[in-house]
Image (cartoon, rainbow, N blue to C red):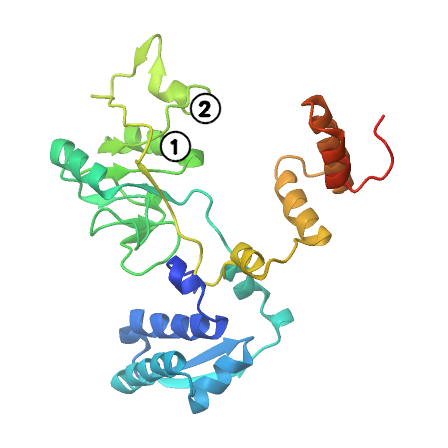
Amino acid sequence: MRFMEIGSRVKQFESSTWRELETVRRVLNSYDSFLENKTVKVNSDNKNVTHILNVGSKKFKLQKVVTDILNSCSKKNIGLQTNWVPRTENKHADFLSRHTDPDDWSIEKNVFHDLSCTFGPFTVDRFSTHYNAQSSRFNSRIWCPGTEAINAFSQFWGGDTNWLVPPPSLVAMTINKIIKDKAKCMLVIPEWKSAPYWPLLYKDGGFRDFIKEVIYLPRYNIIVKGYRPIFRSGGTAKLIYKNKKLSYTAARQNIVKRLKMVAPQLNLGLHSLRSGGASAAAKSDVNERCIKRHGRWKSDLK
């Protein structure tokens, strides 16, 4: 099985040991009926986790989670075994813990309420997770607590009044699914006329026949950004709090990683940014002394 838990910003600043223990607790609570009278083996590359699960902790927060875990196991007669594994042998789980979803967004609750009163009620939210679902019934991209189904496109949308706030990359698939299932829904998307999905909605000067009504939401105070995964500590915040400069290697890795998404063969060093930044600054009439100071040049600019 594959799990990825998303948490609040507060949880991101808890210790990695707390986050891993909390994961064990949530998995046991979510699948306690399935795991009843069975033995669960917990593999972790954190030695503190395996030690604390066996002997407990003097820290209140950690001990509280462990107590909840042991109580859950006792109620369902679940055996618990712990096993430490080197990080080099834990690559798959480590990859999932670092996963982020750039398309994780939703609509403000008050906006949804107004739309639901006018066009709803909506019976199922097809693109959400447990912390931003607008309906008690929802579909998610991967497993999370309370999800009715994984992958909304595997479900039949007819017979429901669907609330659809898909990632931009899935809008075209969503429109085709609406047409195929003859689904009743509200589709919330950006007015992006150059996007590949726009011709599916608009043709010959008007919206297509299957669209009954079009409304335009205000530009501001509408979108809610999603949370980062619970296992990702606030890395950028750490740099701010410690007043520590971003290293050359870390900066290069982060920038090149994103550029290679659109140019896989790219070979770029940060010196390109240094010289390019100086050229851009000079063209914008930035003071030469300022350019020299930021670029750490001693020679005069030519």
Q: Position of residue 129 (x, y in %)?
A: 33, 52
Quarter of the image with the C terminus in it: top right
Q: Which residue is mark 1?
A: 171
Q: Is residue 190 above or below residue 75?
A: above
Q: Are the residues flagged by discs 2 and 1 in contact, CB closer than 8 Å? A: yes
Q: Secondary structure at mark 1?
A: helix
Farthest right residue in view: 299
Q: Which comes before the other along the chain, label 2 or label 1?
A: 1
Is residue 202 at all visible to an observer of this figure?
yes
Q: Position of residue 235 (x, y in %)?
A: 54, 58
**Circle 2: residue type:** Ala
Residue bearing the label numbered 2: 195
Mark 2 and mark 1: Cα distance apart in space? 10 Å
Looking at the rendered structure, the kind of residue marked 1 is Val
Compared across the picture, whether 125 is left or right of 84 comes to left
The quadrant where residue 261 appears: top right
Q: Residues within 10 Å of mark 1 (few under 14, many from 20)?
A: many
Q: In the image, what residue occupies the spot 55% across and 56% down? A: 240
